[in-house]
Image (spheres, rainbow, N blue to C red):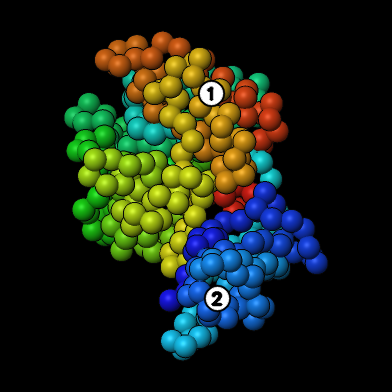
Amino acid sequence: MVRIAEPFHGAILNHRHGTPAEGGLRIAVRGEAPLRDRVTVNGQTARRAGQEFTADVVLRSRETEILAASEGVGGRAEHRIRVLWDRHSRPRYRFSIDDNSFFLRDVAAKGYASLFDCFYLAGLQRLNRLYGTKFTVNIYYTTGPDFSLPQFPDRYRGEWADNAPWLKLAFHAWANDPDRPYQHASAEQLLGDLDRVAAEIHRFAGEAAYAPPTVIHWGMVQPSALKPLATRGVRALSGYFCPAPWGWDVNYLFDAARSEYLSRHDALYDFESGIAFSRVDIVCNNVPVERIVPTLAPLADDPNTAEIMDLFTHEQYFWPFYHHHVPDHFERLETAIRWVTERGHQPVFLHEGFLGGPEPD
């Protein structure tokens, strides 16, 4: 038995994971094979130390297959993986806000002269003007009997278009409840809800303001839904990939090995669907102001988590009537945004290019 341990199948590698070499990126390949076997990696003899082997591979293309082969008294065995080289990667961050519905209801009810007469959108606009932050706002179709998207007027289409370079609307779910609405749902139900929300966004905000979803409510969908989601333009999905008493959670039902990997890395590519999965680095409504930087700083020191900062929060905590209102919510956002900005991370939308950067070639 021969097994490649590093890199992981689907790993998204950038300049932090190797050294420039011969027009490519030289990376280390590590794994295990029987003690006396001869091991090659992409045809080159590997170095051995006990059961471990190491070899260098130079990535020159967007995708590279790595083949480790061992030959000995037991015959020949192989292990193949594929990795993706994010050739043009640069430090970047995105900001996503989940569970949005209250601000839409507020604007529709108050009939403001401008979208930004709503304190919530005004606060986001302020952060954009100070730091250039781009926000993806993930919305519901309905908040219940008192409001649904068809009630939102189209009179603000011009403002949505003017602000689309930094403010996008995306599908999140049909409604806040029940929890985990798509964990056991069919792809047809998920896409049906997505299409109805997308149609409303196009109606009242226009094409420029629309973004394909990058977070599905609760981060749980059936594996069979991933390819269909890709047909709707989904190119990146974020989750927590966190351990729970019952296993891994908010992980799009990934297996334990991929979930554990994503708990320690920025992202992982799913070749079957063509979707890149990103790990959320911070949920601002859960982290006090004084803990924002201590939460993010260790990630910036780790090459596996330093390149892409996936910042995140939830809309309801901004509103004073909400029972878990966070009075300093905007201060938490600004603390996180200021810190990543000072470290040279640029604001992006994850759905544009490759995880917000130029497409690898």
Q: Position of residue 178 (x, y in %)?
A: 19, 38
The residue at the point 45 percent across, 12 percent down is 328
Determine the secondary structure under disc 1: helix
Residue with the mark numbered 1: 294
Q: As shown in the figure, which amino acid type bears the numbered disc 2?
A: Ala
Q: Residues within 10 Å of mark 1 (few under 14, many from 20)?
A: few
Q: Position of residue 179 (x, y in %)?
A: 22, 38
Q: Position of residue 268 (x, y in %)?
A: 49, 55
- In the picture, measured across the screen, residue 145 lies left or right of residue 327, that is left
Q: Residue 61, relative to residue 128: is it above or below?
A: below
The residue at the point 45 percent across, 51 percent down is 261
- In the picture, measured across the screen, residue 254 lies left or right of residue 160, that is left
Determine the secondary structure under disc 2: strand
Q: Examine the rendering and report whether any part of residue 79 can be seen.
A: no
Which numbered disc, 2 or 1, marks the residue that appears first in the sequence? Answer: 2
Q: Examine the rendering and report whether any part of residue 16 can be seen.
A: yes
Residue with the mark numbered 2: 68
Q: Residue 213, relative to residue 80: is it above or below?
A: above
- Image quadrant holding the C terminus, namely bottom right
Q: Position of residue 224 (x, y in %)?
A: 31, 63
